[in-house]
Amino acid sequence: MTRNRPFLSILFWLVSSLVTLFPIYWMFIVSAKSRVELFGAPNFIIKTFFSENYIKTLTDPTFQKYMFNSIVVATTNAALVTTLALFATYALARYKLTGKENIFFWTITNRMAPPAAFLLPLFLLYTQVFVVGDWKLFDTRTGLILLYCVFNLPFAIWTLRGVIEAIPSELDEAAYVDGAKTWQVIWYIILPLAKPGLAVTGILTWVFAWNEYLFAATLTSVHARTITTGLAEFVTVTGTNWGQMAATAMLTLIPAIVFLALVQKHIVAGLTFGAVKG
């Protein structure tokens, strides 16, 4: 029984990996076929690569704009959320705030709420309240960035709390004795030690903002539409262009993969940072 455990473990993870990766592989297969081939017999092997699906998407100014919007919104949101979460978590971890546990729990409940419950109020706010002359917060990248902060910031605070609490407060006290200001303590002590946790928080919030569909589809129309909402444009009354839709979906994976590769070395360290206290 003991000898079989490594084999069973490997088999389990192999099957799990195949089940997880097969939809992506099948999406790639679809993206490499023409419309005629797609309606033929299913084939799991690519015989001829139909590059026109990718060329049409890459040369389409509309989808170039959608991709640019997604990159700007996701990157700005991740940077803003991570920065705000660092300051908020430092305050919750270091200062004796009245009811700080209640504050922390309240931030988490904001993340627990179903996003669909906010659709109508947010739509009215963006179209009727946040209006200055002819300018509205509706259909703007700024509107999406601020909105994603509302939902991603509680998660970021929850993620970073263990990281900040794992850093000994004696380091702060020693810096204060030497005459350091609060911003200097955060910049020179907390920030370098919390880099793994900040990297994980940044990548997760970036992915959440990049993949979000519901709010982007409801609160944008033309100028601020993201690439995830652009996929719906391939579904028309005359049919669905499955090949180009799959090609566009494959292209949306590239920035996420690149971003993950850049911070990969910090992910495991960040997820385990502060898990065990001495």
Image (tube, rainbow, N blue to C red):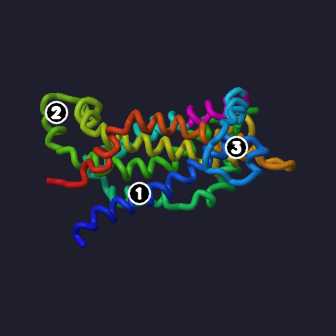
Q: Would you identify the image quadrant in which residue 188 lies?
A: top left
Compare marks 3 and 2 and give the one earlier in the sequence: 2
Question: For the residue marked with disc 3, what is the amino acid?
Answer: Met
Q: Quadrant of the N terminus?
A: bottom left
Question: For the residue marked with disc 1, what is the amino acid?
Answer: Leu
The residue identified by callout 2 is 175
Determine crowd level at label 2: few under 14, some 14-19, many 20+ residues with C-alpha closer than 10 A: some
Point 39% across, 44% down: residue: 201
Q: Residue extending furthest bottom?
A: 1
Point 18% across, 44% down: residue: 169
Q: Secondary structure at mark 2?
A: helix
Residue 198 in magenta stretch: no
Q: Position of residue 60 (x, y in %)?
A: 73, 29
Question: For the residue marked with disc 2, what is the amino acid?
Answer: Ala
Q: Nearer the viewer, residue 155 or 12?
A: 12
Q: Distance of mark 3 from mark 2, alpha carbons?
A: 55 Å
Q: Is residue 137 visible?
A: no
Q: Residue extending furthest front?
A: 47
Q: Nearer the viewer, residue 254 or 179?
A: 254
Q: Secondary structure at mark 1?
A: helix
The segment highlighted magenta reads 60-73
Residue 61 in magenta stretch: yes
The residue identified by callout 3 is 245
- Say whether marks 3 and 2 touch (CB < 8 Å): no
Q: Would you identify the image quadrant in which residue 195 lies?
A: top left
Residue 5 as seen in the image, left or right of residue 84: left
Compare marks 3 and 1 and give the one earlier in the sequence: 1
The residue identified by callout 1 is 14
Determine crowd level at label 3: few under 14, some 14-19, many 20+ residues with C-alpha closer than 10 A: many
Q: Distance of mark 1 from mark 2, alpha carbons?
A: 50 Å
